[in-house]
Image: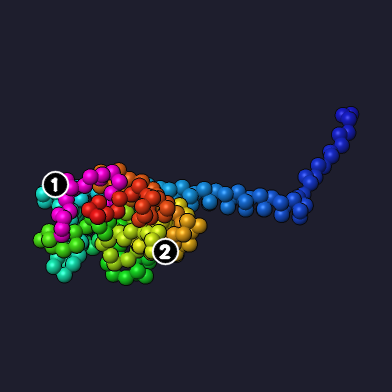
Amino acid sequence: MPPIRHCHLVFARAFTLVEMLVSIAIVSVLMVLVFGVQSSVQARVKQAKCAANLSTQAKAVMFFAADNNGRFPYGWNVWYPTVWQKDISPYLGIPTTNTRSTPGIVFQCPMITQGDINIAGAGAVSHGMNEFIIPQVALQSDTPVKTVQSLATPSRVPLLGDIWLQNSDRMIAISKVPAGNTGNVAFRHNISPAARPAKVPRPSGLTSFGGGKVNMVFCDGHGEALSPEEVANAGDNVLVWNPWK
């Protein structure tokens, strides 16, 4: 007769309420970290795409200048009702009938959405040309004539950059003097991803639109991501906003 075997039932110990709450808390923290990293990566990708867009536009500006005796493209005015984006569109393979404020187009920062444009109004763009570079009137009546060849230090002269989303073709310089002159440069990257970032008072005495970085490309074609202090139009700054001053 075979020996009698006793079956021992083994019961798995259930999670206590405290252990379940701890597990849920850990999972929640991990999810926050993952989404935070993902959001940061997406913001950096958009910043890189924005910088690439500006570089592409800068090349088109230089192609335009080469075909026009070194002259920079005009901005909109009553004598020449065409924005500079239209002038360089043929060099980008973009139909001149295409609106410059379309989301995803090269003239817009990738952070800009249709909703942002709807709030800002018709014609709103997020990239502008240096207000001192862009010829102010048609028929080249500016004095002195604004040409690529007349730039003494093109590597330090801003050409294009991020602006506060609005209907403007100009990037207006931020300044330390007078106090509170915020211009329209948008420091939206990394810290302030909003299309229309709020004013930020800074310990340096500046008030800027946003507290992040601005993507800016210079007249020699190189690009930089700069802080408000690096961009400010002041004597202690290495940028040359107005090379004909």
In the image, 215 versus 69, the foreground residue is 69
Residue drawn at 17 percent across, 46 percent down = 149
In the image, 132 versus 129, the foreground residue is 132
Residue drawn at 20 percent across, 50 percent down = 61
Indicate the secondary structure of the residue bearing disc 1.
helix
Could you tell whether 60 is left or right of 37 in the image? Answer: left
Residue 108: quarter of image: bottom left
Residue 186: % across, % down? 38, 58
Q: Is residue 184 above or below residue 63?
A: below
Quadrant of the drawing holding the N terminus: top right
Distance Cα–Cα, label 1 vs label 2:
39 Å
Other residues around mark 2 within 10 Å, as few (<14) / some (14–19) / many (≥20) = few
Residue 82: % across, % down? 17, 64
| Closer mark to the observer between disc 1 and disc 2 | 2
Q: Is residue 215 above or below residue 80?
A: above
Where does the magenta region start and end? 142-159
Whether residue 47 appears in magenta in the rendering, the answer is: no
Is residue 199 visible in the rendered image? The answer is: yes
Q: Which residue is mark 2?
A: 179
Q: Which mark is residue 66?
A: 1
Q: Earlier in the sequence, mark 1 or mark 2?
A: 1
Is residue 105 visible in the rendered image? The answer is: no
Whether residue 157 appears in magenta in the rendering, the answer is: yes
